[in-house]
Image: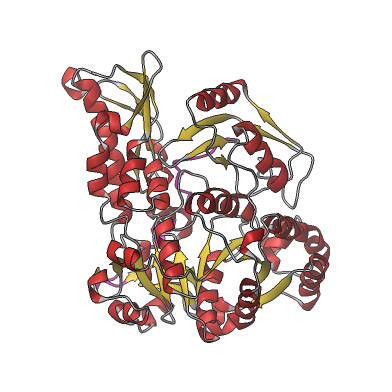
């Protein structure tokens, strides 16, 4: 079989103007970036405000494993399949980040015959959104350091600076650095560090901003530091918000591309604030719902991380209500959850699958707690046996949930027809009024964290360190008690221990520290050691990426 990049390079893309025209987008509402990608203007969003919304489909998955689950591939394939059965579907995806692309992933645009294109552009610089976010974040840091250098009028305590510089590349050597060395002329010496661009609060703000005015207001509310007497200092206090908005003026507009089969795809925003949200922006989702009858989007990692935050944070802030949730799994990944080493996943192992399928069961039950219909998509591999598929069938029947075998990787939209039919049926009969959050706004922050941990993770209780308890009280006193909570933990387990696979119970989740993303509008609770600047593996994906003498890129996947 051809590689992902070879499949993508061989497909015949439509001019982006043709894709836009089929959606009813006017030429003046389109800002082309070459022949096959474009920005969608704010004028389009304003024109469509009064249009009815299409159905919103959220694609999520079981806990990630080394075997892979194929969430993006399923999302793209489902959109193509919807088109195959005659439905007007639009895919809404996050943009890839250069760090993971060159680090451990090698690409993030789907796979096989379920990809978004132009695949190379999307996985590299695309329309420059990530670079704009990097620049805006680092401008804020530069203005902050300059403020202290030029007399420190606000009396900022350099020991209590909260924002870090960022770069869109995995580079562990930048996690902890010293800036301002070399004498008085070079600034105020202090400890600093870099995070990956997509973990920055600016990224979160771009994803959650309703429009340009909301973007500027949110940027102004970024908590950058505290003064010597403990008063908070925000980005607007050092007058950084206007220039940051200028840098993001174009980046805030969603990007239009297409799949291999010509299905429209809006890609915008990315994983933010290290919370495994892994979803596109509010603006992108809203536009997709206005332009299509079905908007198919995804959330990062397993449903305990990405989907929970999509539902409890994004939907809460944007007033969205999903009509159907698709939970993606593979037989291989479920066997891994049952204790099979990744080197032995191709061999039939029914007992291990019977044990590991509890992970799927927990994810399905969790998603149902939101009052949304659920469909299971089994991303099929050639090594799956009839006996193993019978275990999946029995599990889904016992849950009373519909499932479909998906073969979109090998067959494109044609391999997802049954999945598309099930999703359409469930979405069309969904009751939006049945949707319910995990917790109400007025619940205290600690109780919100406890609600997610016990209802979604399956924890028995939550333990807060003294530092976390102190910060929760401080944030409540500062008026942040109404905010939703965003728990950052390992993606590999429901618990805070990556080695506890399946569906662990009776554990206590430990909250080590708490911080506020005031501009984004949520409180982050950190469980375990959460990495905001990943390092490269021993053999980075970058070593296999190259370009031929005639400009053809190889090695992306």
Looking at the image, residue 306 lies above or below residue 12 = above
What is the number of callouts on the image? 0
Q: Residue 48 in the image: state x and y as whole percent.
A: 37, 68
Question: Does any portion of residue 555 appear in the rendered image?
Answer: no
Read off the magenta span: 528-552
Instruction: Tell me the residue at 65%/53% (across/down).
Output: 436
On screen, residue 345 versus residue 114, left or right, reads right
Instruction: Tell me the residue at 59%/33% (across/down).
Output: 445
Q: Residue 34 in the image: state x and y as whole percent.
A: 23, 72
Looking at the image, residue 21 lies above or below residue 325 = below
Verify whether residue 530 appears in magenta.
yes
Q: Quadrant of the C terminus?
A: bottom left
Most frequent secondary structure within the magenta stretch: loop
Pick whichever, 90 or 483, lies toward us: 483
Q: Residue 290 in the image: state x and y as whole percent.
A: 43, 69
The quadrant in which residue 545 appears is: bottom left
- Residue ranking furthest to the top: 229
On screen, residue 242 versus residue 46, left or right, reads left
Instruction: Tell me the residue at 32%/68% (across/down).
Output: 47
Pick whichever, 73 or 243, lies toward us: 243
Q: Residue 32 in the image: state x and y as whole percent.
A: 24, 70
Looking at the image, residue 131 lies above or below residue 148 = below
Question: Does any portion of residue 410 appear in the rendered image?
Answer: yes
Pick whichever, 443 or 111, lies toward us: 443
């Amino acid at each position: 079989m051809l590689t992902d990049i070879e499949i993508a390079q061989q497909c015949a893309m439509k001019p982006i103007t043709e894709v836009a025209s089929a959606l009813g987008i006017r030429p003046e509402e389109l800002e082309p970036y070459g022949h096959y990608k474009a920005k969608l203007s704010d004028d389009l969003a304003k024109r469509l405000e009064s249009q009815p919304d299409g159905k919103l489909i959220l694609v999520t998955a079981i806990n990630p494993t080394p075997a892979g689950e194929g969430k993006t591939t399923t999302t793209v394939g489902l959109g193509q399949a919807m088109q195959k059965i005659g439905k007007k579907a639009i895919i809404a995806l996050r943009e890839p980040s250069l760090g993971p692309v060159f680090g451990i992933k090698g690409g993030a645009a789907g796979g096989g015959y379920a990809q978004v294109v132009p695949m190379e552009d999307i996985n590299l610089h695309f329309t420059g959104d990530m670079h704009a976010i990097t620049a805006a974040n680092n401008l804020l840091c530069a203005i902050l350091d300059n403020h202290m250098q030029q007399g420190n009028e606000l009396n900022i305590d350099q020991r209590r600076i909260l924002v870090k510089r960022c770069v869109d590349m995995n580079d562990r050597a930048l996690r902890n650095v010293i800036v301002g060395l070399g004498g008085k002329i070079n600034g105020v010496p202090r400890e600093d560090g870099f995070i990956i661009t997509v973990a920055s609060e600016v990224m979160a703000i771009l994803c959650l901003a309703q429009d340009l005015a909301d973007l500027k207001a949110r940027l102004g509310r970024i908590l950058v530091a505290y003064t010597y007497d403990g008063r908070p200092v925000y980005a607007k206090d050092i007058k950084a918000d206007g220039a940051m908005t200028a840098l993001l003026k174009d980046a805030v507009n969603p990007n239009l591309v297409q799949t291999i089969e010509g299905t429209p795809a809006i890609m915008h925003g990315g994983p933010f604030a290290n919370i495994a949200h892994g979803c596109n922006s509010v603006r992108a989702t809203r536009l997709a719902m206005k332009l299509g009858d079905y908007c198919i989007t995804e959330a990062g990692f397993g449903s305990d991380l990405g989907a929970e935050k999509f539902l409890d944070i994004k939907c809460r802030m944007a007033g969205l209500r999903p009509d159907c949730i698709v939970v993606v799994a593979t037989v291989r990944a479920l066997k891994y959850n049952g204790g099979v080493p990744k080197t032995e996943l191709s061999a039939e192992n029914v007992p291990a699958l019977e044990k590991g399928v509890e992970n799927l069961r927990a994810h399905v039950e969790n998603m149902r707690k939101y009052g949304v219909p659920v469909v299971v998509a089994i991303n099929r591999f050639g090594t799956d046996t009839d006996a193993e598929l019978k275990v999946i069938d029995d599990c889904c029947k016992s849950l009373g949930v519909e499932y479909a075998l998906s073969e979109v990787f090998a067959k494109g939209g044609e391999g997802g027809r049954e999945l598309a039919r099930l999703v359409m049926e469930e979405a069309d009969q969904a009751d939006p009024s049945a949707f319910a959050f995990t917790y109400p706004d007025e619940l205290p922050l600690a109780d919100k964290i406890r609600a997610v941990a016990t209802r979604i993770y399956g924890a028995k209780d939550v333990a807060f360190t003294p530092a976390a308890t102190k910060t929760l009280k401080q944030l409540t006193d500062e008026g942040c008690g109404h905010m939703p909570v965003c728990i950052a933990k390992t993606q590999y387990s429901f618990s805070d221990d990556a080695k506890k696979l399946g569906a662990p119970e009776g554990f206590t989740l430990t909250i080590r520290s708490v911080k506020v993303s005031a501009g984004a509008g949520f409180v982050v609770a950190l469980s375990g050691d959460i990495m905001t600047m990943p390092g490269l593996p021993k053999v980075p994906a970058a070593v296999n990426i190259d370009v031929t003498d005639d400009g053809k890129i190889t090695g992306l996947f």
